[in-house]
Image: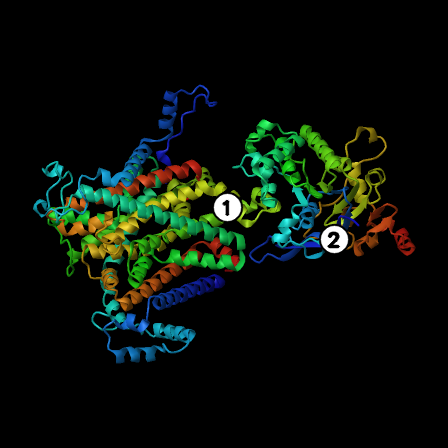
Amino acid sequence: MLAYVLNRMGRALVTIVIIVSLAFVILRLSGDPAITILGPEAPPQAVEAFRKAWGLDQPIWVQYLKYFSAVFQGDLGNSMRDGRSALAVVWERVPLTLAITVPALLINILIGLPAGVLAALLRNTAFDRLIMTVSVIGFTVPSFVMGLTLALVFAVSFRLLPSGGSGTIAHAVLPVVTMGIIGAAVIARFTRSAMLEVLGQPYIRTASAKGAAWSRVIMRHALANAAIPTMTIIGFMVGSLVAGAVVVESVFSWPGVGRLLVTAVANRDLAVVQVILLFIGFTMVTANLAVDLLYGWVDPRLRTKADRAGT
Amino acid sequence: MSVETFPDEEPRHGSGGSVHNAKSRLKVFFEARPPTVLLALAWIGLMLIVVAFAPLLAPYDYLAISLSDRLAPPVFLDGGWVHPLGTDELGRDVLSRLLMSIRISIVIAFLSTLIAATLGVSLGFFAAYFRGRAEQVILMMIDAQAAMPFMIIALAVLAFFGNSLVLFTVLMGFYGWERIARIARGLALSANEQGYATAVRDLGASPWRIYGRHILPNIASTLIVSMTLNFPEVILLESGLSFLGLGVQPPLSSLGNMVGYGRDYIQSAPWIMLAPSLVIVLTTLAISIIGDWLRDLFDPTLR
Amino acid sequence: MALLRVRELKRHYDVRLPGGLMGRRAKLKAVDGISFDVEKGKTLGLVGESGCGKSTTAKLVLGLIPANAGSITFDGKPVTASHDAAWRAMRRRMQMIYQDPLGALDRRLPIADQIGEPLVIHEPGLAASYRRERVAELMAAVGLRRDQAGSYPHELSGGQRQRVIIARALALSPDFLVCDEPVSALDVSIQAQVLNLLEDLRAKNGFASLFISHDLKVVRQMSNRVAVMYLGLIVEEGPPEAIFHDPMHPYTRALVSAIPTPARRGRRERIVLQGDPPNPVDKPAGCPFHPRCPSAMDICRTTPPKLIGHGPRRVACHLHDDAPETRLIAAE
């Protein structure tokens, strides 16, 4: 088990190094870092000071190492727009993004999981068909279409909720529901097929043939085994929530990290884009690490397999 | 997933094919395809016609501005047949813009999927052929790409390098390559386990010949299915970025682009954004249905 | 000089024995030091039970897999497993016929394309019309009908597929052919036809071959010399008449006695081997055959016997050690 944990943590570390290196390479490829970080209108003495501070006159690998240490000290340059530290600019938006993504993730799981399990248990009934038909939207309706449709109905037509902005809980409802519905549909579909696969396994049939009560078979065997593949999709959901937040925050003018990213890209505020890129990278690596560790804890078979593969 | 939409086939009459007349062949065709698949095929056929003939089908120039006709409602909201789907804030004909947008969105998605497939198959074969360290590097790239939401990568690249139609299409081509690479590598490895690839190698064939002329045709059906499943996701991604104003740039127009500019008129002229939204949903839905159907047909093991 | 010279060839695999997380590592000695020659135009038959290393030997001598030790020389040049251009060029002269013809054919190509493929690979300058003609000749030579050219492998019978493999292997008129159990996957009624075809073609084209089979009758029909393998080693080697009429090694004796021949029933008792079937991972010390040998002696448990010449043949058995002192120990 220790080997498995170390293996996964090592992988996470490697991925972080790759992401930081990638940011370094992209930054160098796109032009003079001093100009791109400080902005074209920066005074020459500031550019000079920046060059000196970042050691841009030194060999590339020294620059690379300096870049690394700067990243881990949180020194990531200033926003082009208001000159404040890019890290601070991003950091103050984080709570607002968490305020809509965390409830959305809860909705995803609380609606998606039971719906998928029930659909599998009631396979080929009207309920199953209903869930499957509704869940198609998770794959075919883009989040901006979903968001705008909800806004059209609940904000424009019925005037129940605000169509954009922030400040009250009412403002958060539509963004949360938009991301919640789409994610729940994806999870329901995935859970259903994981569950169906488990229900078809011989040991389930054996357990029910031995006379175990059906509810017991489901609780003890089927759910536990279907949980394993379902956990991967929840790790994946964190990724799509992050991507979804970019669009949904823009639709509802919610001032979170996603909207900041879109404006930063449009204005080519590279320091801010870079901080957000690294920030999301760390989030994803952490989420995947958590899923991996949980996975190894739930499924001992997998743990040993990864140990043997030794990669 | 949607295996249930494909009911058991009727036993085909006259399997030798000699007694088939046109009518019974038609019957077999319909029996082999459930109605949802037929509708999906019909929709995709319509879209392909639009892609091919958009300028001929469009009643107006999609850029023509007519300020006197601003925000005219479509037919189903008591508008006239002059502008069947209404006009936008500059008086441009929504139907004409829609047709051109379909063309651009589908062409971008098609080219991007082609790039992703080429990249994925090449790297997958490369990993399967060289094994060892090269394979580890490719697998690490696959993991890294899968770990990061592609939308974020795309936004970062657009921020650093600016936007052009070519760059944007190539960028979209990096979406999904890792899944195709994983599949191609797995299939190539199992082909190498099977006799035919080894036998051709033993004849003295070069790796190019083994992979290009033998392994690729043998695994093509599975690759085509995974490309089909990649296609709608590229459409969603492209329309999402264009919606944010960071994808296809005006004066060109794409489906997401139309929705993005239409949302400012969601109260006064919702039809501007509704028509392209509907096309996005129907197209991704249709391709997904066809992809699932093809997968069940060719390769039930692929998920 | 022999066309193919093999000396002290070894091939070991690292395996992990089943049993818990940390299964014991072990060496599987598939081929454990064998030497033999194949003369120009002659056939060496290789017999033994499954798992004795016959197929590994086949792949080694063609350079399909690398050897751990020993040397292989083909027409004076060393055979490597480097899979480079020189290796590919050498395929012109050495080819293989597989046990499973369907598996060795590409299901998506018509058979004529596959028969002509060696020509495309090694003689790319050849005109397509000439190649078609050559394919037609090859098909006729192996007894395939002209109208079958466009057929796909799954449309043919097992025997016809093996004919396609043979035609493909002979397309470049190789000097050396390895036949790895070429008929064991075929119906008994078809086996004789394919064997006769191979014999006719050898008489006509004069290629040398290594013929591998677990079936002694087949080997006897096809070979000029026969080598018997047991657990990665050659235990007896010689002309087929000698081997089959007067086997010297107890293992060969047991194999020969198991051939169901009605005429011989009265003369010889069938020898049934004792003990477990051989396991190449857990090889016994001394003579590998001793746990199952009816005439095992003390020395067999400690000292591996050497392959020693006896007239036209060679035997590795302490019963036939020529040194008198070993005889004495054996008598006690």
Q: Which mark is on residue C76?
A: 2
Q: Amino acid at mark 2?
A: Gly
Asked if residue A272 is positioned above or below residue A209 in the image, the reply reads below
Q: Does residue B133 appear left or right of residue C293 in this picture?
A: left
Where residue C108 sits in the image (x, y, percent)?
A: 52, 37
Residue of label 1: B212
Residue at x-position 32% and y-position 47%: B109
Where residue A299 sits in the image (x, y, percent)?
A: 45, 53
Q: Which image quadrant is residue C243 in?
A: top right
Q: Does residue B245 appear left or right of residue C22 in this picture?
A: left
Residue at x-position 61% and y-position 37%: C101
Q: Chain of mark 2?
A: C
Q: Chain of mark 1?
A: B
Find out whether the residues at labels 2 and 1 contact each other: C-beta distance under 8 Å. no
Where residue A298 sits in the image (x, y, percent)?
A: 43, 55
Q: Does residue C238 appear left or right of residue B281 in this picture?
A: right
Secondary structure of the residue carrying tag 1 is helix
Q: Quadrant of the C terminus of chain B?
A: top left
Residue at x-position 9% and y-position 44%: B69
Q: Residues within 10 Å of mark 2 (few under 14, many from 20)?
A: few
Where residue C245 sits in the image (x, y, percent)?
A: 84, 37
Q: Nearer the viewer, residue B128 or C87?
A: C87
Q: Amino acid at mark 1?
A: Gly
